Amino acid sequence: MNQGIHLVDLLLWLMGGEAEVVGASGGVVNHEIEVEDCVVAALRFSGGAVGSLVATTAAAPGFPHRVEVYGTRGGAQIEGDALVRWEGDAPRTRPRAPDSVAAGAGASPTGISTVGHTLIVRDFVASIREGREPLVAGEEGRRSLALVLAVYEAAGLGADPPCPR
């Protein structure tokens, strides 16, 4: 699930609260690798919302990451880095589906772009030089990591997930 941690950041930010893992399962289902290639989790957020998290490199042919948020007043679907659907009370410019979206980590862990990480590190260095707070505080990363570790624990994967053969 390491490739999906930035999506965990986004999920926590969108839901605006802490998450509790209700249940999770995962393991190696398709690859001869030393870490899980599929994890699913059911989540409950402090504001009462529920959600699910699915992370896999076992699905062929591999699809771009996708975040979907639905509520009583509308919903949004983000695929790759594009807002592909928005329905709701608030007026918005109609999103346009991207011409093509790279498969990303869904096809292979090597499909992860480093652009987001590069921007975060650049901002962190700049914040030190400029004596200001970074755009993303360390507490946010800690919160996301805590959720990922809780998913591992709930799935029985532990800190060092085994590779069943």
Image: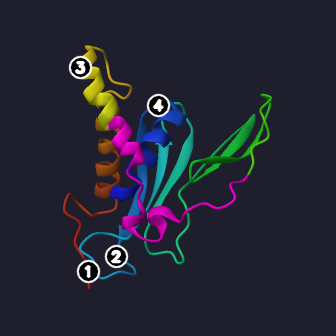
Task: Measure the C-alpha gap from mark 4 to mark 2.
Answer: 30 Å
Find disc 3 in the rendering and name its residue. 129
Task: Measure the C-alpha gap from mark 1 to mark 2.
Answer: 7 Å
Inspect the image, locate mark 2, and give the three-letter code of the amino acid beneath it. Val
User: Is there CB contact under 8 Å for labels 1 and 2?
Assistant: yes
- On residue 28, which mark appears? 2
Side of 151 relative to 52 (left or right): left
Task: Measure the C-alpha gap from mark 2 to mark 3.
Answer: 43 Å
Q: Which residue is found at the position 46% from the left and 38% from the top?
A: 12
- On residue 164, which mark appears? 1
Which of disc 2 and disc 4 is earlier in sequence? 4
- On residue 17, which mark appears? 4
Callout 3: 10 Å neighbours few (<14), some, many (20+)? few
User: Is there CB contact under 8 Å for labels 3 and 1?
Assistant: no
Vertical comparison of 155 with 72: above or below? below
Task: Measure the C-alpha gap from mark 3 to mark 4.
Answer: 31 Å
